[in-house]
């Protein structure tokens, strides 16, 4: 099993290299894409900050704290967009009948699908996330950093990436049954990214529970950021929950991976 | 000789769900679909020996791709048994995929924006081919397919014929024992077609690769495949030698006679039928006039109507002949006739 995993990772690396090579063929185009994507995502971030012109705080959260939340969200979401473009485009693969080709190769279908695209222009959002994070630090000069806080933040971002990738994979799996799935996935990805760029507690309790326990996007930003900012979690949850982010992310990924396998089997019996 | 493909009583039914419009309609269709059962392949049995080249022919929607998909393990059959290279495709799909190659004429597996060579290198990892073997195979294929002149060109800039050569190389780098070709010459010019056919014949002789071709191009069949399988409505209509098909289902042969110049005046006076074509008086039964062009007459006659020499004698008794030739029916016409009349050829013994 470990040998398989290692071989899959190597294959993924080869697929990435070829994708990057292909995209670097049009350098001017790519840089323009990255810059404009940075511009768009930057504007979104500015719009979020505008709230703090008339108001000092949002339910007790200061501008720097919200900025950190949004920055962390941009980073994990941006990474998932960068890595998961192949999954995101899965409907195209299905509609063109190219998934047949994937099944005709002796390597993992998932690795082939995720390695089918790697969208460098998504670096725009990641750059925005880093700039936003720098700005957040500027607003929060008094914040006390420890090694552990950095670790929690890093793990949180990676877990968030995994959670977003899993959502996109779930959406892709739906393509086996119906063609029109992008909207449903977008509600979950863009919607939750947008919502969780603000403190979770501004929403109704049902939504809070939803983002913590069902589609655990809160573990991608809110939970680790609360740990860093030493803020309490809702429902009296312990701050150490932040350490559970990777477990939550892996569980969620496991569920969506299982559903994906089920979808592939369904595809083989229906051929559509 | 050993059997490489053995399919018995293959069956595939599709449940076709009617889709309702819109997102919510789509969701509702998942939960509560309106289903119709469509039978794409029915009771299809097929045996192919190692090293054979077999043509799979049938109109669009006949069940050819469904059959290929089941043989490759992409699609689960609804019934029947399949063994390909000793494996059960659907359960041993990955294992099988190392031993088969597939080329879809209309879809490339090459990376559009990259030089052909990059794609061919990447395929080594996608098929987990050992490096030395890959290098050796690539070297051979470069020569056989003459890839060197365009191997560094991005695929999107290749001509269709070059791209097809690239795709063939891509499908053969892992040395498959069995090659499925879906419309390999579609859209190619005559020279490119000839080149692909030449290559396939060489491949079949040198590596004794078994080849299964679906095509609409009868020249492909006539040059490549001694054996042909005709499928329509998911059923097998014919399975046998291409040369036999003519004698058994020949349809009309054509006699082309050039008459002496002195007969022109008489020909001009022939009465015309309603469609404007001249009619020859008292033609034997089963013979019809196809064309009358100056001194040239074309007569179509069924194999069962009368022997060819009698027709020549009949014509010779009435006109002075300068030249007589016969044209055998196109295999394409014969197949069209089989589709149209839906001659189910159950009585034909299965050749092995």
Image: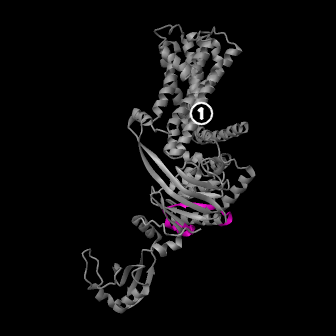
User: Circle 1 — which element?
Assistant: helix
The spot of residue B231 in percent (x, y) is: 48, 61
Residue B291 in sight in this render: no
Q: Position of residue B216 (x, y in %)?
A: 48, 62
**B3 left or right, relative to B258:** right
Residue B36: x percent and y percent? 41, 46
Residue at image coords 53%, 55%: B10
* Quadrant in the rendering for residue B27: top left
Considering every residue shown, the one lying at the far right of the view is B132
Regarding residue A218, the answer to whether it shows in the image is yes
Residue named by callout 1: A257
Residue A151 in the figure: left or right of residue B342? right
User: Which chain's residue wears label 1?
Assistant: A
Please name the residue shown 49% across and 38% down the image.
A175
Residue A232 among those drawn in magenta:
no
Residue bounds of the magenta highlight: B205-227
């Amino acid at each position: 099993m470990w040998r398989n995993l290692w071989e899959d990772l190597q294959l993924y690396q080869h697929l990435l290299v070829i994708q990057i090579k292909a995209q670097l063929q049009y350098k001017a185009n790519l840089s323009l894409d990255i810059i404009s994507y940075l511009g768009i995502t930057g504007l979104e971030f500015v719009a979020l900050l505008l709230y703090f012109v008339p108001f000092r705080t949002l339910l007790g959260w200061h501008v720097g704290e919200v900025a950190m939340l949004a920055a962390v969200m941009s980073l994990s979401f941006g990474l998932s967009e960068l890595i998961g473009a192949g999954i995101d485009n899965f409907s195209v693969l299905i509609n063109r009948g190219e998934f047949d080709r994937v099944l005709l190769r002796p390597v993992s279908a998932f690795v082939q699908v995720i390695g089918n695209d790697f969208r460098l222009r998504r670096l725009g959002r990641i750059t925005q996330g880093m700039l936003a994070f720098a700005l957040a630090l500027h607003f929060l000069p008094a914040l006390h950093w420890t090694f552990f806080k950095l670790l929690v933040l890093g793990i949180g971002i990676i877990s968030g990436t995994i959670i977003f990738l899993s959502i996109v994979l779930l959406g892709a799996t739906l393509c086996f049954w119906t063609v029109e799935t992008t909207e449903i996935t977008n509600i979950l990805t863009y919607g939750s990214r947008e919502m969780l760029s603000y403190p979770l507690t501004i929403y109704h309790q049902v939504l809070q529970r939803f983002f913590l326990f069902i589609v655990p996007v809160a573990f991608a930003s809110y939970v680790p950021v609360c740990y860093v900012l030493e803020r309490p979690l809702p429902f009296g949850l312990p701050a150490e929950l932040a350490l559970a982010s990777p477990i939550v992310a892996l569980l969620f990924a496991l569920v969506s991976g299982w559903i994906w396998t089920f979808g592939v089997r369904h595809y083989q019996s229906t051929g559509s | 000789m050993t059997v490489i493909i053995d399919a018995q009583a293959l069956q595939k039914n599709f449940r076709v769900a009617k889709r309702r419009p819109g997102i919510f309609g789509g969701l509702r269709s998942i939960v509560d679909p309106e289903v119709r059962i469509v039978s794409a392949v029915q009771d299809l049995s097929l045996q192919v020996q190692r090293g054979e080249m077999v043509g799979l022919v049938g109109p669009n929607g006949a069940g050819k791709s469904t059959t290929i998909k089941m043989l490759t393990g992409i699609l689960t059959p609804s019934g029947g048994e399949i063994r390909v290279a000793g494996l059960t495709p659907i359960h041993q799909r990955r294992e099988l995929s190392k031993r088969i190659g597939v080329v879809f004429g209309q879809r490339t597996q090459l990376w559009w924006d990259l030089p052909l060579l990059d794609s061919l290198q990447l395929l080594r990892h996608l098929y987990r081919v050992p490096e030395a073997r890959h290098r050796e195979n690539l070297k051979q294929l470069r020569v056989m397919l003459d890839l060197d002149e365009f191997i560094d060109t991005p695929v999107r800039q290749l001509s269709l014929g070059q791209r097809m050569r690239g795709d063939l190389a891509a499908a053969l780098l892992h040395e498959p024992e069995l090659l499925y070709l879906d419309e390999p010459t579609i859209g190619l010019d005559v020279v490119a077609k000839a080149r692909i056919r030449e290559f396939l014949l060489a491949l079949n002789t040198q590596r004794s690769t078994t080849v299964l071709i679906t095509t609409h191009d009868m020249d492909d069949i006539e040059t490549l495949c001694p054996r042909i399988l005709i499928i329509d409505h998911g059923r097998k209509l014919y399975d046998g030698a291409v040369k036999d098909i003519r004698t058994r289902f020949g349809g009309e042969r054509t006699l082309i006679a050039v008459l002496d110049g002195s007969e022109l005046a008489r020909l001009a006076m022939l009465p015309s039928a309603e469609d404007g074509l001249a009619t020859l008086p008292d033609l034997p039964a089963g013979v019809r006039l196809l064309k009358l062009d100056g001194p040239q007459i074309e007569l179509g006659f069924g194999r069962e109507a009368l022997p060819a020499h009698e027709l020549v004698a009949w014509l010779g008794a009435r006109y002075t002949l300068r030249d007589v030739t016969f044209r055998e029916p196109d295999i394409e016409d014969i197949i069209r006739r089989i589709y149209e009349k839906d001659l189910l050829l159950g009585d034909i013994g299965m050749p092995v």
